Each structure stands twice: as C-alpha cells, then as structure tokens.
C-alpha cells in the first residue's frame, strides 16, 4: 500500500494528508528516499 500511496501523491491524485495515519511514516520515508517532499515534488 505504501507504493500505491507514493505513486498517487507523485501523480497528484492524493495528498499526504489523505494517507492513513498508520502508513504516513513509511510513505514519508519512501518519498524522502526518492528525494521528494510530502507534496511529491523534488526537494531543493
């Protein structure tokens, strides 16, 4: 499910706030590993 939410955030279909609380840490870590912020955009 983490990969699904990461993909939806990157594509703009979901926001980080819409991720279930129990998945937020893993989703945030996966986005960070891809050098992306919680908005799905590249970190600067």
Image (cartoon, grey):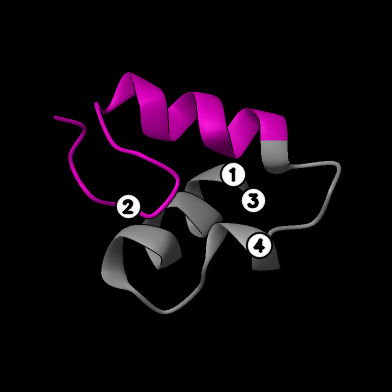
Q: Would you name the residue on which mark 2 appears?
A: 40
State the residue at coordinates (69%, 59%): 19
Picture coordinates of residue 42, whole percent (x, y): 17, 40
Local SS, label 1:
helix
Whole-angstrom CA distance, mark 1 to mark 4, is: 14 Å
Label pair 2/1, CB-CB below 8 angstroms = no
Using the rendered view, name the quadrant where residue 33 is placed.
Answer: top left
Local SS, label 2:
loop
Q: Is residue 28 magenta?
A: yes
Q: Would you name the residue on which mark 1 appears?
A: 2
- Give the class, few, some or many, for how many residues have Cα within 10 Å of label 3's Cα (few <14, many ≥20): few
> Which tag is nearer the camera, tag 1 or tag 4?
4
Q: On the rendered image, what quadrant is the C terminus found in?
A: top left
Vertical side of 2 occupied by 19: above or below = below
Whole-angstrom CA distance, mark 4 to mark 3, is: 15 Å
Local SS, label 3:
loop
Label pair 1/3, CB-CB below 8 angstroms = yes
Whole-angstrom CA distance, mark 3 to mark 2, is: 16 Å
The segment highlighted magenta reads: 25-44
Whole-angstrom CA distance, mark 4 to mark 2, is: 12 Å
Which residue is the extreme one toward the front?
Answer: 44
Picture coordinates of residue 43, whole percent (x, y): 21, 32
Q: Which mark is residue 1?
A: 3
Chain-order first, disc 4 or disc 2: 4
Which residue is the extreme one toward the right?
Answer: 22
Chain-order first, disc 2 or disc 1: 1
Vertical side of 32 occupied by 15: above or below = below
Label pair 3/2, CB-CB below 8 angstroms = no
Chain-order first, disc 4 or disc 3: 3
State the residue at coordinates (45%, 45%): 38
State the residue at coordinates (39%, 54%): 39
> Which tag is nearer the camera, tag 2 or tag 1?
2
């Amino acid at each position: 499910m983490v990969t699904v939410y990461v993909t939806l955030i990157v594509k703009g279909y979901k926001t980080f706030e819409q991720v279930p609380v129990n998945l937020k840490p893993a989703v945030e870590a996966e986005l960070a590993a891809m050098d992306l912020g919680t908005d799905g955009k590249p970190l600067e």
